Amino acid sequence: MNATHFEGSLPAQEFSNILLDEVENGIYRLTINRPKTLNALNADTLKEMDAAIEILEADPSARVLLITGAGEKSFVAGADIEHMSHLTPIEGKAFAEQGMRIFRRLETLRIPVVALVNGYALGGGCELAMSCDFILAAENAKFGQPEVNLGITPGFGGSQRLTRLVGRAMAMELLVTGRTMSAEEAMRRGLVNHVYPQAELADEGMKLAAMIAGKSSSAIQLTKQLVQRGQDLDLDNACVMESDLFGLSFSTEDRQEGMSAFLENRKAKFS
Ligand code: CAA
């Protein structure tokens, strides 16, 4: 077992299936750490991810979360098939609900979440990446929802998020054939933000994280809400929400600092 002791400002936490570390001030990295199974997700791994999200939710200094997989071959090769092979239908539903709830919690986390996809992102791995705000992929990344090959459907939101991200026709093709997409195709279809050589992925992730961490955290938090909540609203209600949160952003210290800095011709220093 590869237990990780997380020493944050919050109570220390033991993890066996994930690693959680603060790479730089406010920039956290969560690594799915089951390389022998290509980082497949079982119930214990999901539970630890939930505990990690709890730590980040409670930490006001957290600015960005990077998520990646241990090793050079795989981000996450899906839900753990060995684990699932023993589940009854009721337990299968509970497993899906567990993953669904945790991925939603990740998606609605206050801070931006960046998936660094360093290899296979299949089934639950593709679903995990799609629950993040950004996907940066290594050139060797492969995306797909191959559940049909196992005689099951996606269970952690894949059929819904993929359809919203790449459109109905392509989502149907990927879900029904179970074929995988290269990183380049995934970028072309709007799933992935950028593709980098494998050796550069971690550094590019840090560059993006540092850029985000230097900006106003209150403005970023509100902007994330606008995009996340707005995409499921009709345009009228989404625009009402935008004026409301625009107004709310005027109540922050960051707005004072951001506008003063512009008018004084200096770089803003956000708190
Ligand atoms: N669950 C459990 N173990 C897995 C796994 C998974 N999803 N994916 C890979 N592994 C294990 C393999 O069993 C193997 O273990 P052993 O060494 O003990 O035999 C080890 O990881 C290495 O895998 P391979 O030898 O298969 O490696 P490969 O390079 O030949 O192939 C692969 C890589 C194409 C990713 C292949 O492993 C594969 O097809 N994995 C399954 C992918 C999949 O079907 N994912 C969807 C799961 S269902 C799901 O996720 C449902 C949901 O929506 C919630």
Image (tube, helix red, strand yellow):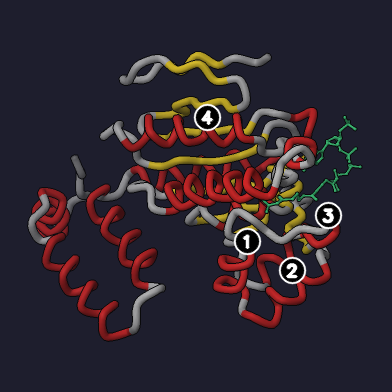
| Front in this rendered view, residue 120 or 183 | 120
User: Residue 246 in the image: x percent, y percent?
Assistant: 17, 68
Q: State how far apart marks 1 and 4 are (Cα).
A: 21 Å
Q: State how far apart marks 2 and 3 are (Cα).
A: 12 Å
Helix, strand or loop at mark 2: helix
Q: Looking at the rendered structure, which numbered label has been put on residue 48?
A: 4
Mark 1 within 8 Å of ligand 1, using the beta carbon? yes
Q: Quadrant of residue 224?
A: bottom left
The residue carrying mark 2 is 175
Q: Looking at the rendered structure, which numbered label has been put on residue 150?
A: 3
Q: State how far apart marks 2 and 4 are (Cα).
A: 28 Å
Residue at 60% across / 73% down in the picture?
Answer: 163
The residue carrying mark 1 is 158
Helix, strand or loop at mark 4: helix
Mark 3 within 8 Å of ligand 1, using the beta carbon? yes
User: Residue 122 in the image: x percent, y percent?
Assistant: 73, 52
Q: Is residue 37 above or below residue 112?
A: above
User: Residue 150 in the image: x percent, y percent?
Assistant: 83, 54
| Contact check, label 1 and label 3, Cβ < 8 Å | no
| Front in this rendered view, residue 127 or 116 | 127
Q: Amino acid at mark 1?
A: Gly
Q: Quadrant of the C terminus?
A: top left
